Image (spheres, rainbow, N blue to C red):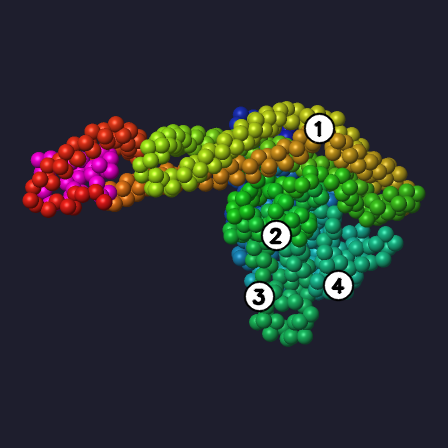
Amino acid sequence: MDEIVFIGDWVKDRVLGSGSFGTVVLWKHKNIDERLAIKTCKWGDELTTKHKERWTKEVEMLQTCTHPNIVGTKELPEEFLKGLEKVNPSKLPILCMEYCSGGDLRQLLTKPESCAGLKEVQVRQILSDICNAIKFLHLNKITHRDLKPENIVLHVPDSSPVIGQNQKKLTCKLIDLGYAKEIDSKSVCASFVGTLQYLAPEIMYSKTYSNSVDYWSFGLLAFEIICGTRPFLPFMSPVQWMPEVKKKAHENICVFETFHGDIEYSNEIFPENHISKAFKASIENWLRVALEWDPKLRGRDAPSKVTFDIPSEQKAATSNIVFFSRLEKILSSKIIKIFSMVSLSQHAYEIDEQTTIATVKSWLQKDTKIPMQDQMLISQTTYVDIDNNEPVVKYWNENCNIMLYLFNKTNCINEQVEPVVPKAVQRCLEHPKTLYNYKNSQNLYRNGLYFVMTQIEVYDSLIQGLFARGESLKHESKQLLLKHNLIDKSIAKLLAQQEIIIKNAEIGKKHIQNIRESGVGTNYLGGFEKIFNLADDLSDKISKLQTAWSQVSVRLQSAARRSNEALHSELNNFVSKYNYQAVFTQAMKTFITYKRSEFCSETRREQRQCQDIMKICYECLKLRSKILLELNRQPFIQKFMHLSMEFAKIADIIATTSENTEKLSNDLITLSSELTNCTWSTLSILASDAENVGELPYSVISIQKKEFKIGDSVSKDCIKVSNRVNEDERLRSLVEESLKIRKNQSSLNEKLNIQKKMWDNVSYDFSFLNEN
């Protein structure tokens, strides 16, 4: 096909792939934005009837299997039938497929940054898409039989959203159904197909097999995208590693060679990966089901140790296929990922809709030893210290690697935190002159680059956490200023209340002093002394509160100003001065150079020292120590700590002031009520106990002469003063009326004495008017 470049309005772009039978070429239309992936058979008469049947079957299956995770077919433009006639000697059907722009999964896995597997977001997406595709095929009684990274293509639509670290969300699609075969639940296959390294053991050991072979291949694929390497002795051929893997227990999901060539079995995936601990634990349980050696038990919920001795008829009855359901449950689970700023480590927990921040803090307390009351969880979306009662799911984001940052209120960053170093790198640093064979050196270079990348991730998370803390301090200062303004208004109201009470108390004191000087009614004035003393005490407390509050206002304004200073610019300056860019660039170059040397057979046979990667890992450790040491010396770190403590103190003071202001306001209201009650109670007592009208003040009674009857009680003809003003105005009116009493008291007594003498001359007995 190399000689054909133009077919009508179509232009050959490049060869996308070439297999044992066919070649896939990308064609672009000159006038419209359309691309097609066209697959043609590169053989002619040498093809056997079986091969031709396989090719035709693939075309038919792809045209009938319509699913978003299986590559779609398109109608072949008519010009290609004649244009590709020369390069299609077999005359077999030409397969026209949609173009997937992301290449195949193998290309993604061979990138240097994928040396220890993919990111968790990518892993979840790939597993979900392939699970959907395989499940669809099995429901339609089709077994793929050749599941491998080369047969999975990645499609990245232009409209695809960014899911973190500038990566767009991709869609995985299965291709190459040439080995696929329609089967039913009772039928078996008997043809030797597929790539050897991904073959299920029964294909090599038995003449028959079922669709459980896809479970095995999928399990190997899942392990590889998580760790960057296959789980079972990847340096051996299938004929070599299968006898060793056959010995594994049900719990074993990994078989590997040690540094000294010993074979070990493990229940866990390799620790060098980019997935969270919570997801790792769940996926390990699923891998035990997927990588079960016995094909009759693979993908089912019956452990091999329990059911090996059960007859085949009973096995089917006692176990159920859980391969897809368990994986779907794992992929649908929500995992909250938290970065600890103190220990520089990531913590992950599976959550549900009811999980609260308080629950997560209790988990963190067990893992980090930080008391719950000292923990502060901050999100990059809100920049606030999240309340303990809030649901955690509110801050969950499946596309985010770090969702919350954990801070210790009493400590910022611990420079003594030891890094997590892979065993291969530790051995290299401890024994720098050790000779490495091909297998051990490959493991070392892979772990060395992984170590550098993880340190960069830790550093980036640390810096992002500091940026988040800087923003949270700004937010905290704004919230404190709002609370401060509310307290200011409350204190202003309190001062207004105090002013009224003070004025009333001052007038009352003068009035009582005048009454005492006149010697009238002094037996009833004892209660006022207590009230006036309480008023003086409250005034003193309010004055102290006002003085203290003005000092808090100055502190808060100063702290708010410092929180808005250029902390971000200081952080950016630090990042530009201290970063891993040089170390990472050198590590990538060293890794790529080593990978290129793998193609040389002599390099694979000889032993070598790995001084280059060892020096890079050593420089990375030195840089880490230097960064942590310098970071703790930076002024912005001290500002963070000082502002954190200052805002915490001010927040406590504001809360206390709010309580005290409310209490003093209530005390003033109570005191005002007591003063009013005391005044009117005193007047009531005077009115009810008076035996001479001359002793009654005008503010208490008003005599209506025209209705006065001789012999009736004087108090019955008294008109009470109507309550037409508010409480404070009544008190002022009371004081003014009391002053008039003193001026008119003498003339009133004279008039009453004259009337008394007149009645003495009458024969009626008016002794009830006599004074005692």
Compute the Cα span from label 1 to label 3.
Answer: 62 Å
Q: Which residue is mark 3?
A: 320
Q: Nearer the viewer, residue 737 or 3?
A: 737
**Residue 248 numbered mark, or none:** 4
721 and 94: which is toward the camera: 721
- Seen at 88% across and 41% down, the residue is 610
Which residue does the numbered mark 1 point to in the structure image? 635
Q: Earlier in the sequence, mark 3 or mark 4?
A: 4
Q: In this image, 259 relative to 477: left or right?
A: right
Of tags 1 and 2, the one toward the viewer is 1
Amino acid found under the numbered disc labelled 1: Pro
The kind of secondary structure the magenta stretch mainly shows is loop
Q: Residue at x 53, y 39 (%)?
A: 656
2 vs 3, front mark: 2
Q: Label 3 crowding class (10 Å Cα cut-off): few <14, some 14-19, many 20+?
A: few
Residue hosting label 2? 362
Label 3 to label 4: alpha-carbon separation = 22 Å
> Measuring 52% from the left and 46% from the top, which residue is drawn there?
390
Establish if 149 lies above or below 635. below
Asked if the magenta segment contains residue 326, the reply would be no
Q: Earlier in the sequence, mark 2 or mark 3?
A: 3
Q: Secondary structure at mark 3?
A: loop
When asked about the image quadrant of residue 263, the answer is bottom right
Q: Residues within 10 Å of mark 1 (few under 14, many from 20)?
A: few
